[in-house]
Image (spheres, rainbow, N blue to C red):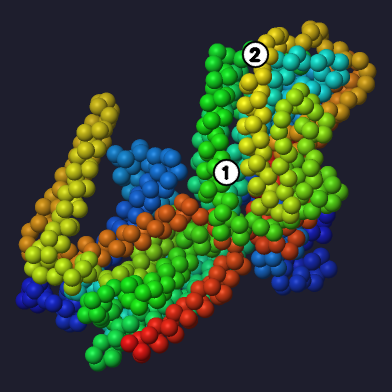
Amino acid sequence: MSNSSFYETDVQRQDGTFLDANELVLNMGPQHPSTHGVLRVVLKLDGEKVLGLDCVIGYLHRGVEKIAEHRTYAQFAPYVDRMDYVAAVSNGLGYCLAVEKLIGVQAPPRAEYIRVIITELQRIASHDVWLGTHVLDVGAITPLFYTFRDREEILKIFEKYCGARLTTHAFRIGGCQYETYEGFEKDVKKFCDFVEPKIDEYEELLTGNRIWIDRTKNVGVLKGKDCIELGVTGPVLRAAGVKWDLRKAQPYSGYEKFDFEIPVGTNGDTYDRYLVRIAEMRQSVKILRQAIEGIPEGPIMAKVPKVLKPPVGEVYVSIEAPKGELGYFIVSDGSTRPYRVRVRPPSFVNLQALDKMCRGALVADVVAVIGTLDIVLGEVDR
Amino acid sequence: MLQSFLSYMNSTVTPGEAGNYIWATIYILVIFAMISLCVIIMNWGERKALAHFQIRLGPMRVGPHGLLQPFADAIKLMTKEDIMPAQADKLAYWMAPYVVLVAVFTTYTVIPFGRTHAVTDMNIGIMFILGVASLEVLGIVLAGWASNSHYPLLGSLRSSAQMVSYEVAMGLTVISAIMMTSLNETGVGTLSMIGIVLAQYEQGAWFIFKFFPLGLIAFAIFAIAMVAETNRAPFDLPEAESELVAGFHTEYSGFRWSLFMLGEYAAMIAVSSVATTLWLGGWMRPFPNWLAGPTWDFIFSLFPAITFLILAGLTFYNVARMPKHPAFKIQTAGLAVFGALLGFIGLVFLIPAVRVRIFDIYWFMIKVAIFMYLYIWYRATWPRYRFDQLMKVGWKVLLPTALGVLILTAVVGVLR
């Protein structure tokens, strides 16, 4: 992503000439309060106006894709949780679905319902983290604590269900490892009743807030056409008015059974993305209510051989993660280990739009746009 | 010398006016110490109040209910390494926090905490305050420039632009308050801080209620401008944490940083004091004309004692609520001592000689405390303005409104 000419400092060029005195190169990150981890953004500024920027990534690179080549299919599953660690369940679901497609197994209906419930809970949790940190970047410190309070309730359900809170490894290839615990339905129902007024509370603090509207309207505008050209997906794409949600477009894990809407925006600005995500949280609650009502009895694990030896071939499966399209491309050479696993992370692709969204904006907008893109550096760098 | 020391005890003017240099020096020292103490209390109060806004408890470990936390912080800051960047402009870097601090504390010379409780009364008091307070920005620009680093530079640029543009609106509203002081028989107004309060007493109305709603609008503009002037949320752009890391004091650490913090909080108290003096009747108790007479004077002069006794009661209530575990013995005892101290102060305030000298300070501090709470409230509620929006609010909204209020005040004042 980087080109060397960009790094020429504001002091002196190699040929001895000086840069335009109005230009300032500001190095934001990798240690910065609001680059959401270890993103480094090199900004070229004129005063406070952004002339251009360059993302430097890789500070959190752990070689997840390479590790996959040295682990069996089942062994690799916990690793994917470490990519997008605020939405670990969605990562696990995508991987399990991909391997299931590779070996030609379909998870039983009860497992699919459990998967939907846990994933939608995770979507709310992920959006909670997004809202808290994004609003914190824009300067309001209080909503962060409210969103984390509500996320805590979700993590409690996760902990009861599978023993882990963050990197859950909740699903297995072929279904789920764990049956729901006693009172799971009650807990989820209680959570649904609990979280809806809380979402109203967030909106009360922000939606009509004059400063919030000023800070987000027409900031970081990304139109639908640009989104498609850049491959941007998820709420960012939908806020630009493109009605594209993989849960509807190519349903997986039984999403076709649920009645929910795809919230879309019109302008594709930061405020629309905020509204879309808030609406998505409400839709997730709607899905949760239906899933908890209609959860069938039955097995939670399909018949999967002890030693996984998928046939030679390749498969691409993508799901609608909270941040966008999360895809797994797996190549099998017939052995117990994948020949190649390639992840299409939504954060990485969405981050490419940062430069386009920030040009001509101010430094404060860069921070707001990084927040609204909802990136997780663990997923960007993998 | 002792003579002059004792003679001032019954004085009815400030030591500066009386030419009593010993008492003036004492006042300077006391005000400096008390403002520093207020900053410490404010620090604790802000963390506690902010925590409760955010469903947290705030400091709870150092002392009962974290009462000793500010002191622990102070010790930490004093003993911390004082880092000076290698590329920094040494002299300017060293000087900047002192410039801020001196500018802020100089304003306290003319702020009247009571009819006699000010270092001196200047006939140009309010101009003096505006002038000296605007020197504060010099220290901030100096800090940003001397750090020789990008974030502080951007922070100080923002700060200078912001403070300069909000001072204009602020100044205009101050003028409308000064014009209100001239609405007496002689038609002569005053710039003296004490004179402004006395004018409100004579006219029988705080200036916030004068020419309703003109006084209220002018006050509101002043209240907004003063938040911007002190770089507090939602106008805290110069130290916007999520954008500029820590703005102009990014490179500062330890003691020098604590001076900036002291300066910031002292400036908040200073501008709140100005707002109190100009619009809320300064040291005057509520309804000095309507509820006049010695009986009412007596009742209102009991308020400081009652407040401290209530605080003592609250403390003892919390002593009873402390966990009974032996590990909390020292904390519980400490809290009880603190409660006893508050109660003792309350009882001292009941002594007639103390009572009549102290109660104007009390009413002044109560009014300032309301502003302090508002500062915390703003910070907990609002996102931060962007730089251009801040300028827009300053120049396109506040300035024209302040100008309009100024003209209308003049017109109404003449037609009256």
For mark 1, what is the residue?
Answer: A132
Determine whether label 1 and label 2 are within 8 Å by CB: no
Image coords of residue A259 (percent x, y): 71, 30
Q: Amino acid under label 1?
A: Gly
Nearer to the camera, B376 or A280: A280
What chain letter is assigned to the residue under label 2? A
Q: Amino acid under label 2?
A: Tyr
What chain letter is assigned to the residue under label 1? A
Q: How many marks?
A: 2
Nearer to the camera, A124 or A357: A124
Nearer to the camera, B143 or A315: A315
Sequence-wise, the earlier of marks 1 and 2 is 1
In the image, farthest residue toward the bottom? B186
Q: Quadrant of residue B131?
A: bottom left
Is B312 rendered above or below residue B1?
A: above
Q: Residue at x 25, y 92 (%)?
A: B186
Query: Which element type, helix, strand or loop, lies under badge 1?
Result: helix
Q: Split into 4 quadrants, where in the image is the C terminus of chain A?
A: top right
Q: Residue at x 60, y 44 (%)?
A: A131
Q: Residue at x 81, y 50 (%)?
A: A224
Relative side of A319 to B185, left or right? right
Crowd around label 2: few <14 · some 14–19 · many ≥20 (10 Å): some
Crowd around label 1: few <14 · some 14–19 · many ≥20 (10 Å): many
For mark 2, what is the residue?
Answer: A178
